[in-house]
Amino acid sequence: MACSVLSDYCVEVTFLRWTKGTINLKLDIFSDSAGVLATLRDPFVFTQVGIVGGALTWPGGIDLAPDAMYDDVKSDQ
């Protein structure tokens, strides 16, 4: 899996079988119920995304499971 930061709180993810798509996190991050995701409102923090154990991760222990992202990307194709 690989990822790259795009504009407007989006991340492009590429899975092992070359399935590629864009995950838009803006609505989740700016939601009233964002919880720990609210930390990602800081653009500097958002751009620190990486991959650990197949999950998108940010400083502070924030992560997104790959299975849900894969399902979202596949449904958009």
Image (tube, rainbow, N blue to C red):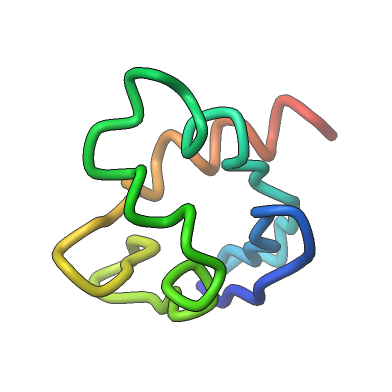
Quadrant of residue 62 in the image?
A: bottom left
Residue 69 versus residue 11 in the image, above or below: above
User: Residue lying farthest top?
Assistant: 32
Number of dots carrying numbers: 0
User: Residue lying farthest right?
Assistant: 77
Give how far across and how far down residue 14 sits, in percent.
65, 66
- Which residue is depicted at the point 58% across and 63% down? 15
Give how far across and how far down residue 75 sits, in percent.
72, 25
Quadrant of residue 51 in the image?
A: bottom left
Quadrant of residue 47 in the image?
A: bottom right
- Which residue is depicted at the point 33% across and 61% down? 55
**Nearer to us in this view, 19 or 41:** 41
Residue 61 versus residue 22 in the image, above or below: below
**Nearer to us in this view, 32 or 23:** 32
- Which residue is depicted at the point 51% across and 33% down? 30
Give how far across and how far down residue 56 sits, in percent.
39, 63
Residue 75 versus residue 65 in the image, above or below: above
- Which residue is depicted at the point 36% across and 44% down? 38
Horizontal arrangement in the rendering, residue 18 relative to residue 31 (left or right): right
Query: In the picture, which quadrant includes the C terminus?
Result: top right
Residue 2 versus residue 26 in the image, above or below: below
Horizontal arrangement in the rendering, residue 49 relative to residue 20 (left or right): left
Give how far across and how far down residue 31 sits, in percent.
47, 23
